[in-house]
Amino acid sequence: MKLPSLLVNLFLLYQTSALAQIQIAGKIVDEKGSALAGVNVIIRGTYKGTTSDERGDFNILISENEAINLDFRLIGFKSISKEITNTKVSINLGEIRLIEQITEMNSVTISAGAMESSDAGKAVTLKPLDLVTTPSAMGDLVSALQTLPGTSMVGNEGRLFVRGGDASEVGIYIDGLRVGNAYGSTANNVPTRTRFNPNLLKGTFFSTGGYSTEYGQALSSTLSLHSKDVSARTQGDLNLMSVGGGYSQTLATDKHCISFSGNYFNLNPYQNLVKQDFDWEKSP
């Protein structure tokens, strides 16, 4: 008699457990009444949930007398929530309508035009302070650039050589105009210097390849110099060197500016201090 009693007790426990579950069902549709598949139905605060099928139907089981919130989520639609407090064995929520979420996109402007061939946007690679503070350059533009990779010095020329080519292969431009003679005159065996004061430039762009078609005449490299805009104030600049010095004066107005500069060089004190093996009647 013990075995039948045990089976009866197990059967009663199974019925009690089955009755302790409440089934919640419903159908999820959009604003037009079309079924929505793949909608996430989640019991808030738990990991329990389900998804709607291709007909928009869903079923989920909860414990008896358990007050819950069901969240309905689908990408592209506004999420909604339903509070369940009914203790019926089976609850049908009917149609649950999700409203499409409108996301406003910022305006997109598409413009067509010719490709700009200028390198002006990149012409600030070296600032004047970078040039005048380069060791051994003594304020010379080309001497400072000869410390960069890809450049080389050929004897005492003092000109800009790149990849072993001739100095004429390097195109030098000021504000887009090619410079015919960028170097000053010099005596034999004395390095020549450029004619440009780095302080008169607002930026330099030096490229050993990959420059634009604007500099098509340059064979091995290009040196693009960009002069300063209208000066903001009237000022004077004094520069001193071991072999001379110079002075420049800038006069500025609201719309115009003009600059004057003068330099004086004398090698006599230097050659008297450091003996040279030059056969000159008089030093330059």
Image (cartoon, rainbow, N blue to C red):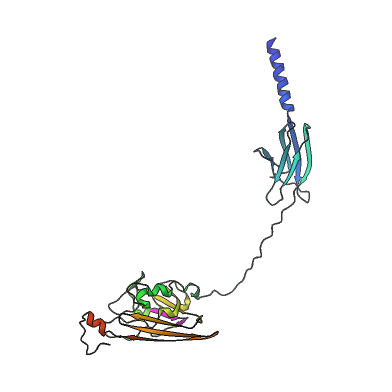
160 part of magenta stretch: no
Task: Report the span colored magenta.
Answer: 170-177
Q: Position of residue 260 (x, y in %)?
A: 43, 87
* Vertical comparison of 4 with 264: above or below: above
* Vertical comparison of 3 with 281: above or below: above
Q: Residue furthest toward the top?
A: 1
The residue lying toward the viewer, choosing from 117 and 227, is 227
214 left or right, relative to 63:
left
Q: Tell me if I can see residue 263 in this picture.
A: yes
Q: Quadrant of the C terminus?
A: bottom left
Snapshot quadrant of residue 68: top right
- Residue at position x 25%, y 87% from top? 283
Q: Position of residue 108 (x, y in %)?
A: 64, 65
Q: Position of residue 160 (x, y in %)?
A: 35, 77
* Vertical comparison of 169 with 60: above or below: below
3 left or right, relative to 256:
right
Q: Tell me if I can see residue 217 in this picture.
A: no
- Residue at position x 35%, y 80% from top? 240
Snapshot quadrant of residue 67: top right
* Vertical comparison of 263 with 86: above or below: below
- Dominant SS of magenta comes to strand
Q: Position of residue 247 (x, y in %)?
A: 39, 84
272 left or right, relative to 71:
left
Q: Quadrant of the N terminus?
A: top right
Q: Residue furthest toward the bottom?
A: 281
Q: How many marks?
A: 0
99 left or right, relative to 258:
right
Snapshot quadrant of residue 195: bottom left
The residue lying toward the viewer, choosing from 262 and 178, is 262
